[in-house]
Image: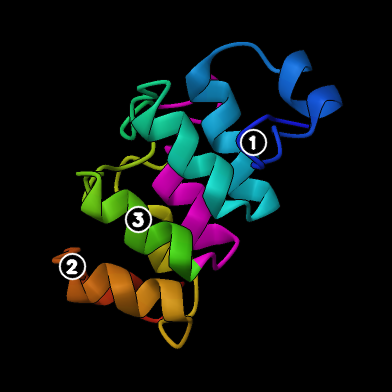
């Protein structure tokens, strides 16, 4: 337990994942906004870092898992809403989701480009 009264990130998961960028994506998947904020603000994780295998950024993953609060935070932290995945360079993962998702709406409202072909997620 931290002296400040704030809990540390879950040590098992946190310590086993090396690097702020990897931890950032891990906490996005878990939906842990508090630890996402810590990775970005304190550890200086790169919000536009692409996973070397998938090419996905933390924002791509936040949209995929419909983490609206995390999407909002990452966009405010200057995540590029139009950065495309290296796996599917023609389209950001946003357009494989339903535009009814709150995360998708946040992306569109933040300037994500909509290509009509992918507008419905196909």
Residues drawn in magenta: 50-67
Residue 120's place in the image compared with 89, above or below, is: below
Mark 1 surroundings within 10 Å by alpha-carbon count, few (fewer than 14), some (14 through 19), many (20 or more): some
Task: Identify the mark at residue 26; answer none if there is no mark.
Answer: 1
Disc 1 element? helix
Using the image as rendered, state which of residue 101 and residue 55 is in the foreground.
Answer: 101
Q: Please provide percent x and percent y for residue 65.
A: 60, 61
- The answer to whether the residues at label 2 and label 3 have Cβ atoms under 8 Å apart is no
Q: CA distance from mark 2 to mark 3?
A: 12 Å
Left or right of residue 100: residue 74 = left
For residue 75, side relative to residue 35 (left or right): left
Residue that numbered label 3 is attached to: 73
Given this view, does label 3 or label 1 mark the residue nearer the observer? 3
Residue found at the far front of this picture: 3
**Picture coordinates of residue 66 (x, y %)?**
55, 68
**Residue 113 is a magenta residue:** no
Look at 52% across and 33% down and name the residue there. Answer: 24
Choose the circle earlier in sequence order: 2 or 3: 3
Q: Position of residue 29 (x, y in %)?
A: 65, 48
Left or right: 16 in relation to 119 = right
Q: Which residue is mark 2?
A: 110
């Amino acid at each position: 337990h931290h002296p400040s009264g704030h809990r540390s990130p879950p040590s098992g998961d946190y310590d086993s994942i090396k690097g702020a960028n990897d931890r950032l994506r891990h906490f996005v998947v878990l939906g842990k906004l508090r630890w996402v904020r810590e990775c970005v603000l304190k550890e200086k994780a790169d919000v536009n870092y692409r996973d070397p295998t998938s090419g996905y950024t933390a924002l791509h993953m936040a949209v995929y898992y419909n983490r609206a609060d995390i999407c909002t935070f990452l966009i405010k932290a200057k995540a590029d809403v139009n950065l495309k995945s290296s796996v599917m360079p023609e389209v950001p993962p946003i357009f494989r989701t339903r535009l009814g998702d709150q995360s998708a709406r946040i992306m569109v409202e933040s300037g994500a480009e909509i290509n009509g072909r992918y507008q419905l997620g196909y």
